[in-house]
Image (cartoon, rainbow, N blue to C red):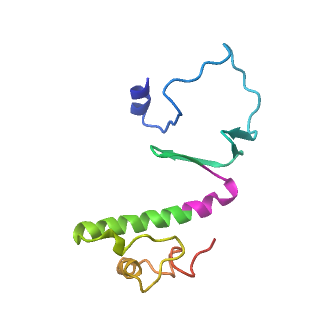
Amino acid sequence: DTVLIINYGFPCFSYATTARQGPAAMQPWECNGVVSVSGTVVRPGDAIVGDQDGVVVVPAKVAEMVYSIAHGREEIEDIVKEELTKNPGPPGKFYPFMSGKVKVDSPLGKLLATKGITPENSNQFEGSANW
């Protein structure tokens, strides 16, 4: 069934490809309750995000902030990949970088400025973090 599920085109994540066998009949106990999955608490409204590398739970109260930080990092990653494709060189020139810590005068800060990303419009720079 794994190939069929993948071909459906919607995200599906599991520990294994075969479910553990349990009682012959399962009945829902509760809707919108708090659950613990392998020691991780999941509450109603929390965001569940996953890919081939794993799954994380983002608490609802910080989901927008986490998205903003992650989206900013993705934008930077795309710019760095594009730059290294055009001008091959050591990636260490731009890495490692920490969100909220990019310095304006660093090679990464200068590269981002050429793409219009500055402390005024990004939370990735030193002193611009809003978390």
Residue 1 among those drawn in magenta: no
User: For this view, does 38 lie left or right of residue 8?
Assistant: right
- Residue 101 place in picture, x, y as percent: 52, 76
- Residue 75 location in percent, x, y? 42, 66
Please name whichever residue, 90 or 48, is drawn nearer the observer in this view of the structure.
90
Callout count = 0
Q: Height in image: 109 above or below 29?
A: below
At 41% from the left and 68% from the top, the residue drawn is 76
Location of residue 103 with respect to 7 vertically, above or below: below
Quadrant that contains the C terminus: bottom right
Provide the major secondary structure of the magenta segment: helix
Outermost residue, bottom side:
105
From the viewer's perspective, tell me whether residue 35 is left or right of residue 56: right
Residue drawn where x is 25% and y is 71% of the image:
89
* Magenta span contains residue 58: yes
**Measured along the vertical axis of the image, is residue 72 above or below residue 45?**
below
Residue at horizontal 49 percent and vertical 62 percent from the top:
71
Give the extent of the magenta segment: 57-67
Residue 78: x and y in percent read 36, 64
Residue, x 46% and y 71% (percent of image)? 97
Residue found farthest to the top: 24
Residue 57, given in percent of the width and then of the height, sits at 62, 49
Give the position of the N terminus as an image quadrant: top left
Task: Relative to 4, say whether 128 is above or below.
Answer: below
